[in-house]
Image (tube, grey):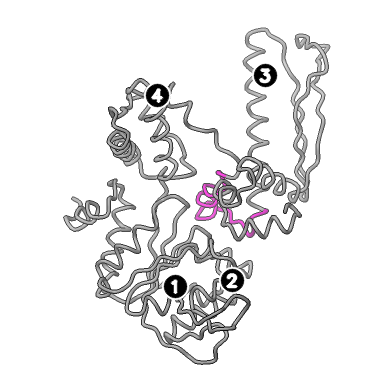
Amino acid sequence: MIKTEIQNIKLRFGIIGNAEALNRAIDIAMQVAPTDLSVLITGESGVGKETFPQIVHQFSRRKHGQYIAVNCGAIPEGTIDSELFGHEKGAFTGAIGDRNGYFAEANGGTIFLDEVGELPLATQARLLRVLESGEYIKVGSSKVQKTNVRIVAATNVNLTEAIADGRFREDLFYRLNTVPIKIPPLRERGEDIALLFRKFASDFAEKYRMPAIQLTEDAKAMLKAYPWPGNVRQLKNITEQISIIETHREINAAILQNYLPAQPMDARLPMLLGAKGHGGGKTFESEREILYQVLFDMRRDMTELKKLVNTLMAERGEPGYNIVHPVPSSSTINISPMIHTGNVTPVDDDIQDTEEYVEETLSLDDVEKEMIRKALERHHGRRKNAAKDLKISERTLYRKIKEYGLE
């Protein structure tokens, strides 16, 4: 039976669901709140990590102090030290006066550092000093300042891989990860998906003053089977779309299918990390390996689909297809669309018509560049929206745009 305290927290913070992993995360947040230990919250984008630092703060001795949430991935690298630690007048161009940073403003309270994995290495060193001694120095100053701040951090980045790649300090990771809280992805929460849909449908019905939409049993099954790469955020957006667009208030699987997008390649990356990066017998050391594995899996799936179609056509006595099995090299990925060059005749023992394959060899850089280019086009050059679409931070997108000359 679920603890009464956990149920009360759910009501207070608007958390919907009864999944065991979710209840465990709430329980840990409650247990660690009265202490001053650092907390690291991990989970995919869109799972609702931002609620848990508020739980930690509100149930701590610092609840009457300042609570400041900082999105580290949205602050440009050149100004993030100033934002966090403040600066002196004249420290850089545009510094027309002294300014206190977030660590000064939140003295006696809590700072939530979202997307902490996107912090530059130099800023990580400054943050480590705050964690170890409560000391920091303003940009352009030599005077040591003191602060008493509790740090709660969150990330959707695999920090173990970031450490191996030299993008994140190992000593900082251990200081932040004193108490880890893992938020489960939506696809692992079972019956919670239908509960969340019903809650969102009710909210939008009240907002737009219309009857709430309801799901048929086949639609509920489809909702539960979908992998939800965008997690709770995606479910909420889809519920709102259906609420506004559909005139019929009962939604069956056929209607729901129109609102569940096919998974793009970039949306599969977090699932691959979760499935193969932990206990799956395989780990990835770079985003390139993940991208390569996704493309390889897609190619394999297409081959299996062609085999299935060929078998079904043969059983019906219809024209069949020969399937070519190209083997990708270790440094390139061969994407080979199938092109018809003439009429297809039935397969017999003596003659087999073959499909002509035109192979286009693309490097991983080319594939990544094209994905970024198309995302920018889809969002008319708006980088914030493109970064969200690609499931990467704005800073990473800026770096990739510069790297590939896409300005």
Query: How many C-alpha atoms fall within 10 Å of the one at disc 1: few (<14), some, or many (≥20)?
Result: many
The residue labelled by disc 4 is 246
Relative placement, left or right, of 299 versus 356 is left
Q: Nearer the viewer, residue 25 or 113?
A: 113
Q: Secondary structure at mark 2?
A: loop
Tell me the amino acid under the disc marked 2. Pro
**Label located before the other in sequence (2 or 1):** 2
- Magenta run includes residue 124: no
Q: Nearer the viewer, residue 173 or 65?
A: 65
Q: Mark 3 and 2 residues: CB-CB less than 8 Å, in contact?
A: no
Query: How many C-alpha atoms fall within 10 Å of the one at disc 4: few (<14), some, or many (≥20)?
Result: few
C-alpha separation, residue under disc 3 versus residue under disc 4: 38 Å
**Label located before the other in sequence (3 or 4):** 4
C-alpha separation, residue under disc 4 versus residue under disc 2: 46 Å
Q: Residue furthest left?
A: 4
Foreground mark, 3 or 2?
A: 2
Q: Position of residue 406 (x, y in %)?
A: 73, 52
The residue labelled by disc 3 is 310
C-alpha separation, residue under disc 3 versus residue under disc 2: 52 Å
Identify the magenta region.
267-288
Tell me the amino acid under the disc marked 3. Asn
The residue labelled by disc 1 is 176
Identify the image quadrant of residue 110.
bottom left
- Magenta run includes residue 277: yes
Relative placement, left or right, of 337 versus 175 is right
The residue labelled by disc 2 is 120
**Label located before the other in sequence (3 or 2):** 2
